């Protein structure tokens, strides 16, 4: 624990602010009209949790929390990459189906 009251107050205030913004991002993730909005909100929540873990590491003088934050950051990055790839493949398949269907209908009309 940090002995200086001002630094302690500042760190706790930062954690409270990050918690409130994470909650607002959670609302955005729930209400987001598109999947990409939800994906960005979840990514923001992950980033804020990582920042809170680093702040708590300084506040409590526990270095292992930084290691946990690094692992959490790697997992968060991998999940965003996988979900983004899923969105791209899904959208590409949708565009492919839209392009194929009119061509087949045109061939039937010409015969």
Image (cartoon, rainbow, N blue to C red):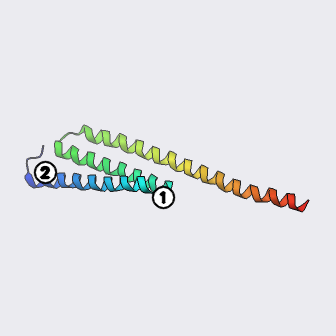
Q: Is residue 106 left or right of residue 13?
A: right
Q: Earlier in the sequence, mark 2 or mark 1?
A: 2
Image position, residue 99 (x, y; %): 72, 58
Q: Does residue 63 lie above or below 31 as drawn? A: above
Q: Residue furthest top?
A: 64
Image position, residue 4 (x, y; %): 8, 51
Q: Which residue is mark 2?
A: 8
Q: Which mark is residue 33?
A: 1
Tell me where residue 57 sits by quadrant: top left
Residue depicted at x 13% and y 54%: 9
Image position, residue 25 (x, y; %): 36, 55
Residue depicted at x 36% and y 48%: 46
Residue depicted at x 23% and y 48%: 55
Front residue of 18/10: it is 18
Residue depicted at x 20% and y 39%: 62
Front residue of 7/48: it is 48
Within-10-Å neighbours for mark 2: few <14, some 14–19, many 20+: some
Quarter the N terminus occupies: top left
Tell me where residue 20 sits by quadrant: bottom left
Within-10-Å neighbours for mark 1: few <14, some 14–19, many 20+: few
Front residue of 20/48: it is 20
Q: Which mark is residue 52?
A: none
Q: Residue furthest front?
A: 31
Q: Secondary structure at mark 1?
A: loop
Q: CA distance from mark 2 to mark 1?
A: 39 Å
Q: Secondary structure at mark 2?
A: helix
Tell me where residue 76 sits by quadrant: top left
Q: Is residue 97 left or right of residue 28?
A: right
Q: Which label lies toward us, 2 or 1?
A: 1
Q: Is residue 61 left or right of residue 82?
A: left
Q: Is residue 49 left or right of residue 8?
A: right
């Amino acid at each position: 624990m940090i002995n200086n009251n001002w630094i302690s107050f500042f760190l706790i205030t930062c954690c409270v602010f990050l918690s409130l913004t994470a909650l607002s991002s959670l609302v955005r993730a729930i209400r987001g009209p598109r999947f990409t909005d939800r994906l960005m909100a979840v990514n923001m929540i992950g980033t804020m949790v990582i920042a809170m873990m680093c702040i708590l590491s300084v506040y409590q003088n526990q270095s292992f929390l930084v290691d946990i934050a690094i692992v959490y950051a790697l997992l968060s990055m991998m999940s965003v990459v996988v979900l983004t790839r899923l969105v791209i493949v899904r959208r590409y398949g949708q565009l492919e189906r839209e392009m194929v269907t009119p061509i087949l209908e045109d061939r039937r009309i010409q015969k």
